[in-house]
Image (cartoon, grey):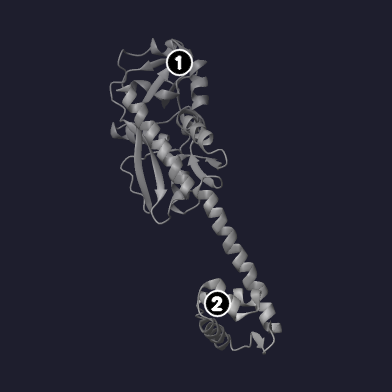
Amino acid sequence: MNINFELYKVFYHAGKLLSFTKTAEELFVTQSSISQSIKQLENQLDILLFIRNKRNMQLTKEGEMLHSHISQAYDLIKTGERNLEHTKALNYGEIRIGASDTICRYFLLDYIKKFHEDYPNIKINITNQPSLKSLEDIAHGKMDFGIINLPDGMKWKGVNVTEIKGFEEVAITTQKFADQLPGHPSIKDLKHFPLITLTPNTNTRQYLNRFFNSHNESLSPEFELESIDLIIDLVRIGLGIGFVMKDAIPRSEGSAIQTLQLKETLPSRAIGIVTNKELPLSIPTQHFMNILINMTNDSASQGS
């Protein structure tokens, strides 16, 4: 049914005040326009909503039933408007972020801390999962945005991508294995040793697979793990050669872990913000992304 919702606004106030005169004053219109609007609504619904006489006006039984529903809807709209005002003031709201374990720990924490300090009433909901899963969820509108390791030559429908930070992927090992390798080992040399990588469902592992394939080699790791921290732990105790984000190597490691200078250069990588093209960003999300971009740019300026 094609109903003009402006008519329901008139009906709500008329049913509440039980006076066309007072309703006209409330809505700053003429009494005749109120009467016409109610008559139009009654015609469209094919039902009598008010009983009118010289002394008073009251709702019919059908009018009372309809008014109870319209009152609930009106209250919900008003609640929504109040919540929107709180959200605009960043006193209320929620942001939903998708990010991998690595990005959460080695990149995102400082930005979450800053946002929470500035806007303590905004709830931050983080789904910790591989970048490719976050990318899929964002494309389907299941979260506001994601911070992901950008896939090479990414062509994913339905998302916007903003690159915010580059990083290096490196091969690491202990002195024991480094002593058995040439000064600049090739990836073919590495295959004679236990290799430690992330699991096949991660963007990083797929990146490494492409890198090995581009040099006519296949990657067959001895250990496949869910966490970069576990890769570093296994390398530290001498179980093999691992591939990790350079920024994830703890400074406290000193000389315990060696970074290998490979003959083949590992391609540079990047972290980016991914959002859904079709969905507008909430006000809290916009503020978080502004903090993310501004702090990253400031950090890059200080480092240069």
Would you place residue 185 above or below residue 15 in this image? Answer: above
Would you place residue 85 above or below residue 291 in this image? Answer: below
The one of 193 and 139 positioned closer to us in this rendering: 139
Left or right: 83 with respect to 191? right
Give the structural element (helix, strand or loop) at label 2.
helix
Which residue lies most toward the right here?
61
Give the structural element (helix, strand or loop) at label 1.
helix
- Number of labels in the image equals 2
Q: Position of residue 14 (x, y in %)?
A: 61, 77
Look at the image and tell me whether residue 15 can be seen: yes
The residue to which callout 2 is attached is 24
Would you place residue 282 above or below residue 214 in this image? Answer: below
The one of 190 and 43 positioned closer to us in this rendering: 43
Q: Position of residue 239 (x, y in %)?
A: 50, 18
The one of 121 and 173 positioned closer to us in this rendering: 121
Name the residue: 40% across, 23% down.
246
Mark nearest the camera among 1 and 2 is: 2
Q: Residues within 10 Å of mark 1 (few under 14, many from 20)?
A: few
The three-letter amino acid code for the residue at tag 2 is Ala
The residue to which callout 1 is attached is 251
Q: Earlier in the sequence, mark 1 or mark 2?
A: 2
Q: Position of residue 303 (x, y in %)?
A: 33, 22
Name the residue: 60% across, 74% down.
13
Which quadrant would residue 172 be assigned to in this image?
top left
Left or right: 162 with respect to 93? left
The three-letter amino acid code for the residue at tag 1 is Arg
Q: Residues within 10 Å of mark 2 (few under 14, many from 20)?
A: some
3D distance between C-alphas at marks 1 and 2: 73 Å
Look at the image and tell me whether residue 192 can be seen: no
Name the residue: 62% across, 64% down.
75
Q: Position of residue 191 (x, y in %)?
A: 38, 24
